[in-house]
Image: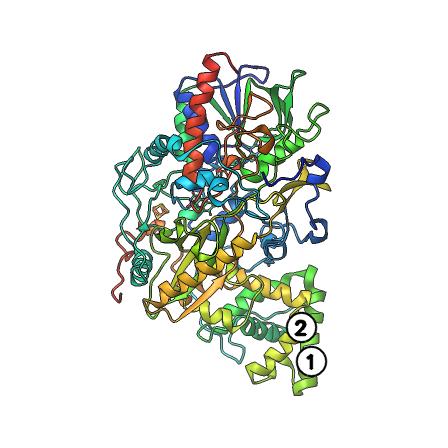
Amino acid sequence: MAAKFDLDDNGVVVIIGSGAGGGTLANELAQKGVGKIVVLEAGKHYKLEDIENDEWAMFGKISWLDKRISAGAWHHTKDFPNLPAWIVKGVGGSSVHWAGLALRFQQHDFKTRSTYGHVPGANNLDWPVSYEEMDPYYSRAEKKLGVAGAAASGMPPLPENNHYKVIAAGARAIGYKDIVRPMAINSRENDGRPGCQQIGFCMQGCKIGAKWSTLYTEIPKALATGRVELRPESMVLQIQHDKSGKVNGVLYVDKNGKKQLQKARIVCVAGNSIESPRLLLNSASSMFPNGLSNSSGQVGRNYMVHTTAAALSIHKAPVHMYRGTAIAAVVSDEAKLDTNRGFFGGYHLEGLSIGLPFAAAFIRPGGWGREISSALEMYDHMTCVWVCGEDMAMEQNGITLHKTEKDHYGLPVPVVSKSDHANDAMLRIHGLAQWRKLNEAVGAIRTVDMPPYPASHNMGTNRMSAKPRDGVVNKWGQSHDIKNLFVSDGSQFTSSSAANPTLTIVALAIRQAEYIADSMKKGMI
Amino acid sequence: MDKDSKKTQDESQQPEGMSRRFFLKGGSSLAAIGITTLAGAGLGTALPAEAVAPPAAGKEGYTQSFANLGSGNGETLVKMARDIFPHDKLPDQLYADAVAGYDADAESKSMIMSGLASMDAIAKKRFGKRYADVALEADRLEVLYAIEDTPFFQKIKGGLVTGLYNSKKVWPLLGYEGSSWQYGGYLDRGFNDIDWL
Ligand SMILES: Cc1cc2nc3c(=O)[nH]c(=O)nc-3n(C[C@H](O)[C@H](O)[C@H](O)COP(=O)(O)OP(=O)(O)OC[C@H]3O[C@@H](n4cnc5c(N)ncnc54)[C@H](O)[C@@H]3O)c2cc1C
Ligand code: SF4
């Protein structure tokens, strides 16, 4: 079944990374008959047996823990100095850990520059693709992911757990109406996978595969076509090119620590928004001294993580928020376009449970004393929110290469720099205040605000643009500079919106696969 | 475009103020988020499966002897652990479990010994007693405030985040049920049983 291709085979499409973007692209291309696909994945190939209902054990097992350095004004610089982001290194990428919330972007999200105008300090830009163009691909993505409650999938909504009920009641009590929960989790048996059993460890990997992850959907389907070879534990160091400037191969370290050169007809980069730009920068050559596809100077810039904050509210009676699907009710009322609140963009209030071990770690990094222990003692009375708001693109937020420090592959360590825009700070304060009100409306006795978690949504560092000078790739995720080089992950995003990114990553990958397959057929690439 | 001009690669490698802001702390996964780990406590070292041991007789209320650090130091350490994350309903034994690993931790022994000695010295100066004998929590906190920025305090506190809160014996006492898949999740076990709304 699973194919095997020669290192010297220069007809191969190489996909770097097997997460939401890369895994989906591999399967879509294979289903369209593209004959030779090699997926290179830095991490190991874990199976459902490896998944544990244990926050720290899973974090330690599958997170990307190669050294990264946090920089900039965000609190990560002090509190998470080597963990700016929470990303998975393994087959399936962060789709193993993701919570499964599958929101669409809104129309204005694709047009932030023309909607907001010039925002001082920000580097906003319209996407070269519109909501109308994306709409059918969103539907296909919803169907693929089996999104519960989405018309396109035909899947019923997930049942409401305790955590959902408390948040939804509070939201209605303060006048919110738009309470949603589109989840890429099977609400019944579907696609050869079981329905959700309310295990409650969605973000540690779903033990029964009820939640969509490329690990046990796209990748096995892709392999079953006989057109795809997956090489786990294969870390790509560099993308190489020929004299004409077209990419023609990738250099990687295989699972035995040996360097290999895989020849390629097309290269698609899907390593998530820190590793993808890092790889392009690390592939600098005499022809491309600033890194591949970087004639705009925008590779690694405009790093967006969503403007986030979190809070725990303590109620007068038990909630047991950890019982069942990690994402509870999601309030969308504040995601609408409304500049009267004093900021651009909007946010979702996303009920998101965390276990006691993570609550202790994140409630106040570095804190101690009764202020903290008295809250944690009420763990089973808590609700928990994650505010997910629009993050403005800013040019100086980004990924750069450390001048001297190298990792164990010999590659410069990535420096991940992020500071708030004033807009972000306003949005965050508004979100936390609304959350407090919402909980107090159903009797919460105490709310503890928490700083943002390590970034789980990473976007924007190889952004799409209509004009080559404004970004890295065109509306198909194709490099402006090198036509057989593609970016296939969230680093393509031109804006962050207030919606979690993965549905859009998948929709873009489905769309990109059509374009690549078609262009190959026409001999254009 | 708000971008004023095209930047060169070298400029782009040096965003404003970044080099000043490097924080290079330890390399382990938890050190990455400012949490230190301790062999024998919490993370990665599965806790013994038996239920919470009943407190042993005697004033300490825990079974560890702290043979290397000395029983007096052990007592200080256990009290300190409780004062850092005080839960009146947790028995001493669980705090002792959370710090027991330091007794076998040769590498940090001198830091621990001198840290504990300085706590006792401050306690004696202010209250005429060693730390563990200072009766009032508020008085003991004064001692902890005096040392809270030291690497010793940071290490003990960081270790407790997992040593205590990742202990499977502590979980049920703080209302957390842990792994659920082996029981079929919560589908038939109360995921939607709320009755007070
Ligand atoms: C805890 C958590 C909860 C989340 N919840 C949600 C949610 O509810 N909704 C939502 O929309 N999103 C959520 N996300 C975000 C979501 O997981 C990501 O947006 C998505 O997985 C990103 O897809 P990607 O393809 O860009 O990268 P990933 O899925 O991270 O995949 C990248 C892959 O590339 C590999 N790789 C990187 N560099 C190289 C290299 N040089 N060579 C070879 N391989 C390489 C990595 O090992 C990794 O496997 C969550 C994330 C986390 C961590
Ligand atoms: S609640 Fe449980 S069964 Fe449902 S998706 Fe999450 S981990 Fe899987």
In the rendered structure, which disc, 2 or 1, sits on the residue that comes first in sequence? 1
Q: Which residue position holds label 2?
A: B147
Residue B54 rendering spot, x and y as whole percentages: 44, 72
Res B182 label: none
Q: Amino acid at mark 2?
A: Ile
Q: Amino acid at mark 1?
A: Ile
* Residue A223 in the figure: left or right of residue B86: left
Quadrant in the picture for the N terminus of chain B: top right
Q: Is residue B71 above or below residue A283?
A: below
Evaluate whether label 2 is on the same chain as label 1. yes
Q: Which residue position holds label 1?
A: B122
Q: CA distance from mark 2 to mark 1?
A: 9 Å
- Is the shortest distance between ligand 1 and the CB of mark 2 under 8 Å? no
Which of pointers 2 and 1 indicates the residue nearer the eye?
Answer: 2
Q: Residue at x 69, y 80 (%)?
A: B122
Q: Is residue A115 above or below residue A312?
A: above
